[in-house]
Amino acid sequence: MKIGIIGAGNIGGNLTRRLTALGHDVSVANSRGPHTLTELAEETGATPVPVEEAARGAEVVVITIPVKAVPDLPSGLLDGAADGVAVIDTGNYYPRERDGRIAAIQDEGLTESRWTERHIGHPVIKAFNGTYAQDILDRHRPAGAPDRMALPVAGDDAAAKERVRALIDELGFDTVDAGGLDDSWRQQPGTPVYGLRGGVDEVTKALAEASPERPEDFRA
């Protein structure tokens, strides 16, 4: 599968490592340019590209950048993507530590992924946002393993969600359908499922126990 990854930090870098190891054709981009991705490309066989080219021909695109950087993504980012491209958003809103005040999220109550979706003009699937980056490399397990972790996946596009869930299964993790994108607050930072290293039952329970009340540090 052709996959584009925008963002080469901890999550983006380790997804690049695992997806190339599984035989996928991965293009990877970051804000600093392809020349800064030489080492990752040599390690993995991924193709470093400018952000504008990351989605070209891609069936799956992963956006794994700070929330505050989403408005800086180039317009028409997905114009060259494959028909029906599934877009994964791994983002988390950290107003005090990193992102500052975003009124639409804080005051209007948009989930961070709905906000991202509106900026890029394409449906997104929220996944990997509460996953420890190192777990992508170290904690994948074959289907049926008793210690296989499960990841929550939220989104409105049923076909895209199924494609993402199938890819996560290939990566070595179970998934739990966390509902639509407006339900994705259940997996934002500060919720029981965020960072949970649990199986399907534990993740399902944690999603159900989430409260819409945001912690104090959610306010910038």
Image: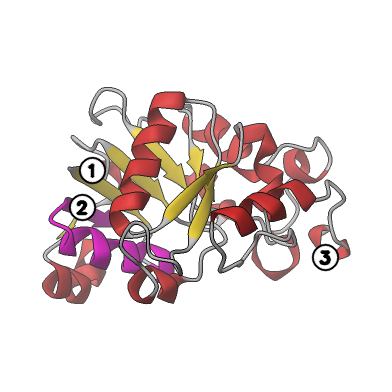
Label 1: how many Cα within 10 Å (few below 14, some 14–19, many 20+): many
The tag on residue 217 is: 3
Query: Front-most of 18 and 220?
Result: 18
Q: CA distance from mark 3 to mark 2?
A: 35 Å
Which residue lies under the disc numbered 2?
Answer: 27
State the residue at coordinates (75%, 53%).
Answer: 101
Whether residue 67 is visible here, answered yes or no, is yes
Type of the residue with mark 2 = Ser
Which residue lies under the disc numbered 1?
Answer: 53
Q: Earlier in the sequence, mark 3 or mark 2?
A: 2
Type of the residue with mark 3 = Asp
State the residue at coordinates (48%, 29%).
Answer: 123
Badges 3 and 1: C-beta atoms under 8 Å apart? no
Answer whether residue 17 is magenta in the image. yes
Residue 159 % position (x, y): 39, 25
Q: CA distance from mark 1 to mark 2?
A: 8 Å
The tag on residue 67 is: none
State the residue at coordinates (53%, 46%).
Answer: 176
The quarter in which the C terminus is drawn is bottom right
Type of the residue with mark 1 = Glu
